[in-house]
Amino acid sequence: MDIGSSYTSFQCKKSKSIKKLDIDFLQMLEDYKVNEWVIPSLIDGNILKKCGYFSSFPNQLTKVGFIKRNCLQNISNNQHDLHCNDFDNTTNTYLTPAACLHIYPEVEQNPIKNEIITTLARVYRYEDGYFKSMERQWDFTVREFVAIGNIKYVKTFLADLELKLLNYALNIFDNVLILESNDFFYPTKQNKLKERYQLNNNLKRELVACIGNEKLAITSFNYHEFHFSKEFNFDNNENIVTGCIGCGLERWLRLLEV
């Protein structure tokens, strides 16, 4: 496992490139009512459970722990190195694996319709330990757009941003395309059915860059139907659905460097 490939720091030039990408993405939403949110890096396990993350992607989760109080004295005095038993991992707290998951419980308390919520977030997915810098990282940056509204509104938004982001990418690199896709669920019989359902109903599409012999997904477009709006009680008698778009900024930066 190459932990050094699981995260990336950026100096001035690359930081400016990421900032410009993000500004350009936000400008694509000028025709929509947009709410900018800030979300935390931590998320409660109860929210993950309600979203179905433990059954769908348990291999992606990173649990948060801390050094036990009765070990602090010896550790601070350099009397012994840290060991697994020195940590308390009993918290029901995790690092956020998907930016949109913070949004649905908030909308349950404050319902909206035909609006976009966006956030720039740090997101954490373990990737089964198979890390590759700028492509498969444990810690990465996402510009997330969540559409909440009636079916026509959400589907129109997803199609509109798909076309805008495709054209934007083509101005950077000429070998990009949109592909139907599915989430990489943890391999169980039930999750195999979820994969087929996604593909058969065109629920997930990706903007993919073909770099050499590799295909790199730089943005995903996801139509959730009533999955989250029903679970978090804002479907309004099956009148409200959700969809999200996630732009992985490290991957977009990788595209700029080809």
Image (cartoon, grey):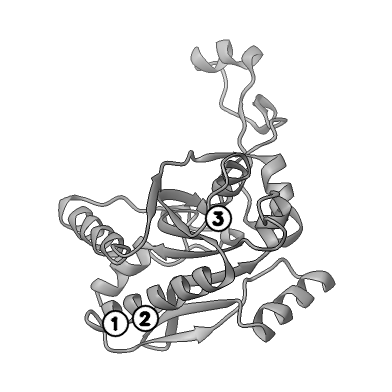
**What amino acid is at disc 2?**
Leu
Element type where label 2 sits in the image: helix
The spot of residue 240 in percent (x, y) is 62, 61
Which residue is nearer to you in this view: 51 or 249? 51
Which residue is nearer to you in this view: 33 or 255? 33
Above or below — where is 194 with respect to 202? Answer: above
The spot of residue 64 in percent (x, y) is 61, 36
Is residue 97 toward the left or the right of residue 176 in the image? right
* Circle 1/circle 2 CB separation < 8 Å: yes
Q: Residues within 10 Å of mark 2 (few under 14, many from 20)?
A: few
Element type where label 3 sits in the image: loop
Is residue 30 toward the left or the right of residue 104 in the image? left
* Circle 1/circle 3 CB separation < 8 Å: no
* Circle 2/circle 3 CB separation < 8 Å: no
Location of the C terminus (image quadrant): bottom left
Above or below — where is 249 with respect to 120? Answer: below
Q: Residue at x 57, y 80 (%)?
A: 181
For residue 163, which numbered disc appears in the image? 2
The residues tagged by marks 1 and 2 sit, at their Cα atoms, a distance apart of 6 Å
Direction left: furthest residue: 13
Mark 1 vs mark 3: in front: 1
**What amino acid is at disc 3?**
Arg
Q: Earlier in the sequence, mark 2 or mark 3?
A: 3
The spot of residue 21 in percent (x, y) is 25, 63
Above or below — where is 61 with respect to 157? Answer: above
Q: Earlier in the sequence, mark 1 or mark 3?
A: 3
Q: Residue at x 42, y 67 (%)?
A: 135
Q: Is residue 188 visible?
A: no
Q: Residues within 10 Å of mark 1 (few under 14, many from 20)?
A: some
| Residue matched to label 3 | 125
| Residue matched to label 1 | 167
Q: Residue at x 48, y 71 (%)?
A: 220
